[in-house]
Image: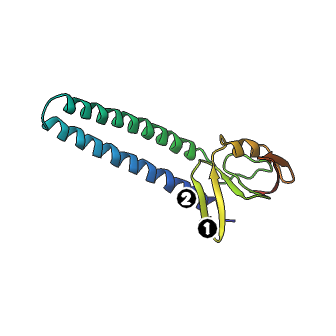
Amino acid sequence: MPSKKLLYEFCLSFIENRISRIQNDIRNVQESLTSETKSSAGDKHETGRAMLQLEREKLGHQLAEAESVVQVLMKVPLDTKSKTVRLGNKVKTSKGSYYLAISAGACNVEGETVFCISPRTPVGQLLLSKSIGDTYNFNGDEISILEVS
């Protein structure tokens, strides 16, 4: 299974790319607002400007959310040694492997797929505080914890 450091770096890259994309979108909306100011006046102009301001506000919320995810990621310990599942653990189950940090999707490394998930996700909630040999039910399947690191 890929190292926790590698999985952490995957999560960090994921969220940094997301923040960069949102910041780029905000710049584009800001440029559009500036050019909209220079265009002709009238109802059409005001509607376009209002839509751009709403888009900028939405992107601002997305940026704030992404920055809060970074704060969560910064709290993820890299040297977690625990017999029970908690933030920062890799968990191998009978149905797949997980890294509890942030929701960043599937990390395909060293020929294995590890799903980077938040402890707040449904699967994350079920994994927390479980130990090797414990089982849980998800979508009608009984899943066993095989490894915690």
Would you say the residues marked 1 and 2 are in contact, meaning their CB atoms lie under 8 Å apart? yes
Q: Quadrant of residue 5?
A: bottom right
Q: Judging from the image, what secondary structure is the residue with disc 1 in?
A: strand
Q: Residues within 10 Å of mark 2 (few under 14, many from 20)?
A: some
Residue under numbered circle 2: 10
Where residue 130 appears, as percent x and y from the top left, is 80, 46
Where residue 23 appears, as percent x and y from the top left, is 36, 46
Return the mark for residue 109. Answer: 1
Q: Please say if 78 is above or below 45.
A: below
Q: Quadrant of residue 53?
A: top left
In terms of depth relative to the viewer, which is nearer, 16 or 126?
Answer: 126
Query: Residue drawn 33% across and 43% down?
Result: 26
N-term mark: 1 or 2: 2
Using residue 143 as the reference point, say whether residue 26 is left or right of it.
Answer: left
Q: CA distance from mark 1 to mark 2?
A: 10 Å
Query: Residue drawn 60% across and 58% down?
Result: 106
Using residue 26 as the reference point, say whether residue 63 is left or right of it.
Answer: right
Return the mark for residue 38. Answer: none
Query: Residue drawn 23% across and 42% down?
Result: 32
Q: Judging from the image, what secondary structure is the residue with disc 2 in?
A: helix
Q: Residues within 10 Å of mark 1 (few under 14, many from 20)?
A: some
